[in-house]
Image (spheres, helix red, strand yellow):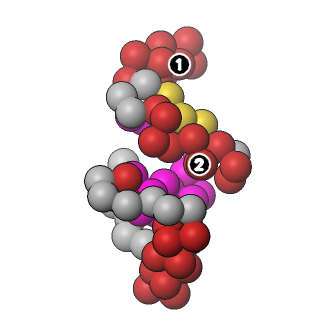
Amino acid sequence: MAVHDLPAADRAGLLKAAAQDAIAGGRIYDAHIAEIARAARADVIVTDNRRHFLAALRHGIRVETPAEFLAALKRKR
């Protein structure tokens, strides 16, 4: 596992996109996480709040529940 932060050069773009898409309140936190996942070239976001991360699909990032993620890990064994 690795810990990532949003590169400084991408932060203004995140805020502009959030304003343009009318993302506010707690949803901005989810948008921030999705943008970090994109910048880190993540394959998957694991969340119980799938609908908050649908924008990640545009970038080819899978969005899975914990149960789906664990099932996929078990299949890979």
Q: Label 1, on which residue?
A: 72
As helix, strand or loop, the secondary structure at mark 1 comes to helix
Query: How crowded is the residue under tag 2: few (<14 C-alpha within 10 Å), some, or many (20+)?
Result: many
Res. 56 mark:
2
Asked if residue 7 lies in the magenta stretch, the reply is: no
Left or right of 64 on screen, residue 62: right
Please name the residue shown 46% across and 76% down the image. 15
| Residue drawn at 37 percent across, 61 percent down | 24
What amino acid is labelled 2 in the image?
Ala
Across and down, in percent, residue 73 comes to 48, 21
45 to 8, vertically: above or below: above
Which amino acid type corresponds to the residue marked 1 in the rendered image?
Answer: Ala
Q: How many marks?
A: 2
* Mark 1 residue crowding within 10 angstroms, few (<14) / some (14–19) / many (20+): few
Which stretch did the figure color magenta? Answer: 30-47
Q: Where is residue 49 in the image (x, y as percent from the top left)?
A: 39, 33
Residue 5: horizontal and vertical position, in percent?
37, 70
Is 26 on the left or on the right of 52, as rendered? left
